[in-house]
Amino acid sequence: MRRLEPGTASTDYTSKAGTAMRQITSWDLGAQVEWSGWDPGTGAAEADRIVAQLATTPPARDRVRLAVTAADRASSEPACVLVALWVPDATTGEPLADLTATLIGTEPGQVLDADEIAAGFARPSRTPGAKVLHHDTARTEVDAGAAVVVTRTVATRATRQVLVTVEWTVVPPDSADGMQLVFSTPYSAIAERMADESVAIVNALRLETGE
């Protein structure tokens, strides 16, 4: 996945007082096999490149192009800086999961606190019309900083459709900014594989900060 220009963190989050006022100035996820990403809102312009990366047959190319359009439309969060698809089999072009990356931030003069973020995620949030089947929160460390990972399985009551998500929140040291990476799949059978992919991608994440 591509390196993007520095973004502006705009989503309020749990914080603590601090003397540092560092912010994310750039970020990089590196090249990920079987994944392709793009800037939100540019799916139509980037579709040919993404299709060429992820599909090798005409039906697969059609399937990836449709998936790019759908994922691009769904990326409405203003602070979202990346949308990506995971297509392990280029001959079918079937996306098994998607990823959205969002910058989060707090007030100037404050720093994000991963422990407080983890505490805030300890209990599952309630979503009207949905039932939480699984919710787990863990606090860990990755190369880019402190991290909180939340694994959820949610079923829609009306359709009984199940969605599995693995949500990482990564906070660089002494920073007012962080990044959330949300991996989602409707296929429970590949949830463990998606979780493994999320670990590899988050471990490749590089966050540059400056005052």
Image (cartoon, grey):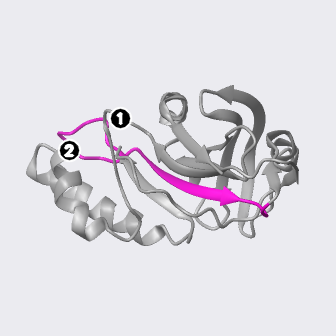
The image's mark for residue 166 is none
Secondary structure of the residue carrying tag 2 is helix
Q: Residue drawn at (75%, 64%), measured in percent from left and top?
A: 12
Residue 70 higher or lower than 18, as above or below: below
Where on the picture, by quarter, is residue 40? bottom left
Q: How many marks are shown on the rendered structure?
A: 2
Is 96 included in the stretch rendered in magenta? Answer: yes
Q: Residue drawn at (74%, 56%), measured in percent from left and top?
A: 131
Q: Which residue is mark 1?
A: 32
Residue type at tag 1: Gln
Neighbor class of circle 1 (other Cα within 10 Å; few <14, some 14-19, many 20+) is: some
Residue 107 higher or lower than 183, as above or below: below
Marks 2 & 1, CB-CB < 8 Å contact: no
Q: Which residue is mark 2?
A: 53
Q: Which residues are magenta?
A: 86-108
Q: Residue drawn at (35%, 43%), measured in percent from left and top?
A: 1
Q: Residue drawn at (27%, 64%), measured in percent from left and top?
A: 66
Secondary structure of the residue carrying tag 1 is loop
Residue 106: image x %, image y %? 76, 60
Residue 163 appearing in the image: no
Q: Is residue 145 left or right of residue 120?
A: left
